[in-house]
Image (cartoon, helix red, strand yellow):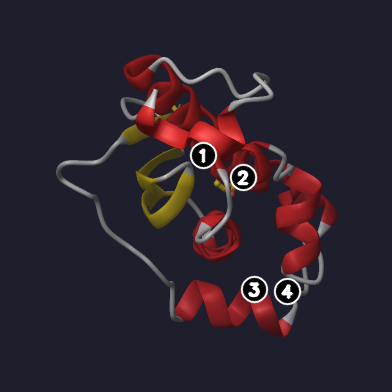
Amino acid sequence: MVYSEKVIDHAQNPRNVGFIEDADGMGTCGDPSCGDFAIVTIRVRDGQITNCRFLVRGCSAAIATCSVLTEMARNKSLREAQEITDAAVTAALDGLPPEKQHCSNLAATALHAAIEDYRKRHRVDLHDWRTPYLGSKR
Ligand code: FES
């Protein structure tokens, strides 16, 4: 199995590790009691993700995908961040070995859950055309 240089860099020097205590949204993926698990927390201001942090229990690929995901999500609107896919996360790392593709699911799924959590807490409809204009002020 061969990892790209980007995977190795993010796995060895993960960005944005941590947990935002008073996060505006929190999402998880996996099962903490028996396996791989990721937590993503986000800070949102005016409809934009201004901070994104992660904690993960998993392999090097899981660490790298969560790390690069936080960089991808920062400074994106909620709508843009919602559209970050597993494939986009993998592409940002110049790919993953086939047997590690599933590890990328933790990151994007946890981010999407964090956005959904934010949406529920603040009653923001991401499909509402007014959302980009009104942000979280409704
Ligand atoms: Fe379990 Fe990668 S997170 S093999």
- The disc at residue 7 is 3
- Secondary structure beneath dot 4 equals loop
Q: Cα distance, mark 4 to mark 3?
A: 6 Å
Distance CA(mark 3)–CA(mark 2): 21 Å
Left or right relative to 112: residue 49: left
Q: For ligand 1, tell me if the residue under mark 3 lies within 8 Å.
A: no
The amino acid sitting under disc 4 is Tyr
Q: In this view, does 63 lie to the left or right of 130?
A: left
Looking at marks 3 and 1 on the same chain, the residue that comes earlier in the sequence is marked by 3
Secondary element under disc 1, as helix, strand or loop, is helix
Q: Mark 2, mark 1: which one is toward the viewer?
A: 2
Residues under numbered marks 3 and 2 in contact, where contact means CB atoms less than 8 Å apart: no
Ligand 1 has an atom within 8 Å of the beta carbon of the residue at disc 4: no
Which of the two labelled residues, at mark 1 and mark 4, occupies the earlier sequence position? Answer: 4
For residue 81, the mark is 2
Q: In this view, does 93 lie above or below 113?
A: below
Label 1, ligand 1: CB separation under 8 Å? no
Task: Please tell me how many numbered marks the rendered image carries.
Answer: 4
Residue at image location 34% in from the left, 33% down from the top: 26
Q: Which of marks 3 and 2 is in front?
A: 2
Residue at 23% in and 49% down: 20
Marks 1/4 in contact by CB < 8 Å: the verdict is no
Earlier sequence position, callout 3 versus callout 2: 3
The residue that disc 1 covers is: 111
Q: Which residue is drawn at 44% across and 80% down?
A: 13
Give yes or no for contact between labels 4 and 3 (Cβ–Cβ under 8 Å). Answer: yes
**What type is the residue that disc 3 sits on?**
Val
The amino acid marked with disc number 2 is Ala
User: In terms of image quadrants, where is residue 38?
Assistant: top left
